[in-house]
Amino acid sequence: WWDFFINGAHNVGNERVGHHYAGALNGGVLARQFTREPHRLGLLRAGAAGLGGSLANLRPDGGASMGLHSDPALLKLDGVSADYG
């Protein structure tokens, strides 16, 4: 949540970031580890969720958003792209 507070286009206080851009970075690591340990299905589930969540951050112009504002008053993608690693 701190990412919105410091770097986001909107600052409404303490809110959760939905599909934060770092989720894809972590998701890739988890999915790669699943290839080494295919019996650990949780790695695949968490990895796919992290990778898929970042696809939901694509704006209509094709740019990437830092994340989804989960505050009920906003519920929209942030206007800042962040760095996506």
Image: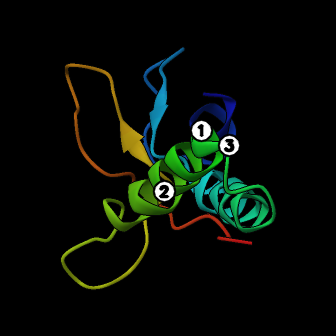
Three-letter amino acid code at the position of disc 2: Ala
Q: CA distance from mark 3 to mark 2?
A: 13 Å
Tell me the number on the disc at residue 9.
none
Mark 3 residue element: loop
Which residue, given by chain and number where applicable, does mark 1 sit on? 42
Q: Nearer the viewer, residue 11 or 23?
A: 23
Q: Quarter of the image holding residue 76?
A: top left
- The residue depicted at 30 percent of the width and 85 percent of the height is 62
Labels 3 and 1 touching (C-beta < 8 A): yes
Mark 1 residue element: helix
Residue 5 percent location from the top left of the image:
61, 31
Which residue, given by chain and number where applicable, does mark 3 sit on? 40
Q: Nearer the viewer, residue 60 or 7?
A: 60
Q: Is residue 47 left or right of residue 57?
A: right
Residue 75 sits above or below residue 19 on the image:
above
Which residue, given by chain and number where applicable, does mark 2 sit on? 48
